[in-house]
Image (spheres, rainbow, N blue to C red):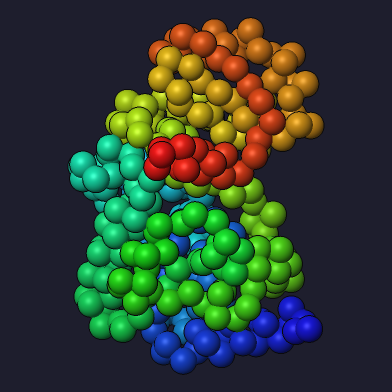
């Protein structure tokens, strides 16, 4: 069994062979680890590029800037317009494909401008087991996945990130805001704004791993079981705030990652 140190060496070796690299950098632990190691190995020849769109919470954009600065990485923002693509906004089960296609189109342009041949993402081994149509877009654009190539799964990504001093090593996963809207329901800037405001409000209570699912007039709060008593305690206050956002009803349940992916088979029937 390979040690984490050996996989770290493999990661550095793989990235080193690129000579220069544009990293699809969201500010999450996976892409931040790739950017940190790329900066260590390639210096100024590594660039982290973050998508700025209505589906990305503002606090995530600001945090991506802060993290990049803390690791001494070059960092750029690019405005993406996936929501203007009907294939995306209609919210079919392959919505993520169109989002990633838009993102990688911009990253390829950044790479060309910089004279860089390679674009990388933060895909790890565990990502290959879930429904992720965005991986098809990565394949089409020949995007490389250093974490996968080094044989790192999610737990090992966090372990390595902690080992080399990445301060967000334990940051919860935070998919884009569009992932809160069930497949088949249109993605709009208004819905995304409602979800973002709702989640920011909940974070003020100290909640970290939360999702607010947008089921039309109903907001469904999902949080780990240990946080449910807190939601229950302040439910009336939360419900009133959500009502002012435009939600007629508010409910809550235990968080489970990928819960909306479970609806895919129903949509296919």
Residue 85 visible at all: yes
Q: Is residue 112 left or right of residue 220?
A: left
The residue positioned 27% from the left and 71% from the top of the image is: 108
Residue 87: image x %, image y %?
A: 24, 45
Residues 237 and 262: in front is 262
Query: Is 194 above or below relative to 108?
Result: above
Image height of 107 relative to 44, above or below: above
In the image, farthest residue toward the front: 269
Q: Write the residue at 61% across / 87% down.
A: 10
- Location of the C terminus (image quadrant): top left
In percent of width and height, residue 226 lies at: 79, 32
Image position, residue 228 (x, y; %): 74, 25
Classify residue 119 by image quadrant.
bottom left
Q: Nearer the viewer, residue 264 or 182?
A: 264
Q: Going 74% across and 14% down the picture, which residue do you hit?
A: 233
Residue 75 seen in the figure: no
Residue at image coords 36%, 27%: 191
Q: Is residue 245 shown left or right of residue 228?
A: left
**How many discs appear?**
0
In the picture provided, is 3 more to the left or to the right than 243?
A: right
Quadrant housing the N terminus: bottom right
The image quadrant of residue 253 is: top right
In the rendered image, residue 14, in percent from the top left (x then y), is placed at 52, 87
């Amino acid at each position: 069994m390979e040690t984490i140190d050996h996989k770290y060496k493999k990661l550095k070796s793989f990235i080193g062979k690129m000579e220069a690299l544009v990293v699809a950098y969201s500010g999450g632990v996976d892409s931040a680890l790739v950017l940190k190691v790329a900066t260590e190995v390639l210096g100024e020849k590594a660039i982290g590029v973050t998508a700025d769109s209505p589906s990305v919470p503002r606090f995530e954009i600001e945090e991506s800037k802060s993290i990049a600065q803390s690791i001494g990485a070059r960092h750029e923002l690019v405005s993406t317009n996936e929501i203007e693509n009907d294939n995306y906004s209609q919210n079919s089960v392959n919505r993520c494909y169109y989002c990633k296609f838009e993102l990688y189109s911009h990253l390829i342009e950044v790479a060309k401008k910089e004279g860089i041949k390679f674009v990388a993402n933060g895909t790890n081994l565990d990502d290959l087991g879930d429904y992720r149509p965005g991986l098809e877009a990565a394949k089409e654009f020949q995007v490389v996945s250093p974490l996968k190539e080094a044989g790192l799964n999610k737990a090992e990504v966090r372990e390595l990130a902690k080992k080399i001093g990445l301060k967000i090593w334990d940051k919860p996963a935070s998919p884009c805001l569009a992932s809160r809207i069930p497949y088949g329901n249109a993605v709009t800037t208004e819905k995304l704004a409602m979800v973002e405001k709702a989640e920011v409000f909940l974070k003020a209570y100290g909640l970290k791993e939360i999702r607010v699912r947008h089921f039309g007039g109903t907001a469904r709060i999902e949080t780990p079981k240990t946080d449910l008593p807190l939601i229950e305690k302040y439910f009336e206050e939360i419900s009133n705030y959500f009502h002012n956002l435009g939600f007629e009803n508010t409910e809550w349940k235990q968080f489970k990652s990928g819960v909306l992916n479970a609806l895919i088979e129903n949509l296919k029937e």
